[in-house]
Image (cartoon, rainbow, N blue to C red):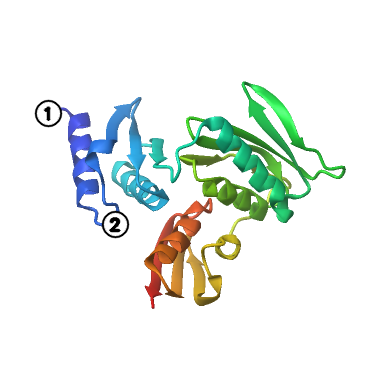
Amino acid sequence: MTAETELLQRVRGALRTDTTIALDEASIVLALSDGLLLIDGEVADVSVKRRLLRSAAALVAPRGIIDRLRVRPATPMEDGMIADLVRDALIEEPALANCRLRLWVKGRPELARDPLSATGVIDIRVEDGVVTLDGDVVGLGQKRLAGVLAWWVPGSRDVVNGLGVSPPEADSDAEITDAVRVALEKDPFVNPDQIRVTTRTATVTLDGFVPTMSERDMAEHDAWYVCGVENVVNRIAVA
């Protein structure tokens, strides 16, 4: 057995026994590519994707990971419809009102909004259900909110948030907490009044009470949707 084969077996075995992941082995491909661990396939939701990547990264460090994991969409959609819905969501968000929006179609940009006093630009691309956001915004809050809104589109299978922040802004646990709170407040299916959010070293902890298990899961997913979150501890009780 080669060292690479042994490493792949060790990673798969560890992921198989990790109860936080609920790995569907039939849908996951592990391989080594130029010394990096390639993870390809489809998972049930964003929490499985993030936990799987986090666990795999710890197992193969200092090697890097090529992430090709996709989340099973709530509603399968064509790329054009996903792009239109992401564009509409960003247009309707008051916190992004000063951002110029461009939708890239067949390699060409289509201007979706061009405010007179634009203070940022967001480029939207969609390929195979994966939404990519590029450009620059004026704060980490805008960057994170744009990513959450893209994740909320039912056909999104992944969101690559490449937005820059200009001028540069220092990140912190407090910034992450604020972003998660904003996501919970804007989610029409979650009542944030009974949920407390704390963050320590990029691990978000959710406490409180909600009436249903589905709302508990949605609150956790909202936290995972926020870029920069490395782990989520869901202590919300269903009452």
The N terminus, quarter of image: top left
Residue located at (71% from left, 34% from top): 102
Residue type, mark 2 in image: Thr
Q: Position of residue 59 (x, y in %)?
A: 29, 45
The residue indicated by pointer 2 is: 20
Residue type, mark 1 in image: Met
The C terminus, quarter of image: bottom left
The residue indicated by pointer 1 is: 1
Residue located at (56% from left, 37% from top): 82
- Calculate the distance from the C-alpha at mark 2 to the C-alpha at mark 1: 29 Å
Q: Nearer the viewer, residue 71 or 234?
A: 71
> Counting residues from the N terminus, which is met first, the one under dot 2 or under dot 1?
1
Q: Can residue 179 be spotted in the picture? A: no
Residue located at (26% from left, 51% from top): 22
- 177, above or below 5, in the image: below
Secondary structure of the residue carrying tag 2 is loop
Residue located at (32% from left, 49% from top): 55
The outermost residue toward the right is: 116
Residue neighbourhood size for the residue with mark 2, other residues' Cα within 10 Å, grouped as few (<14), some (14–19), many (≥20): few
Secondary structure of the residue carrying tag 1 is loop
Please indicate whether residue 184 sits to the left or right of residue 203 in the image: right
Please indicate whether residue 5 sits to the left or right of residue 110 in the image: left
Q: Can residue 119 be spotted in the picture? A: yes
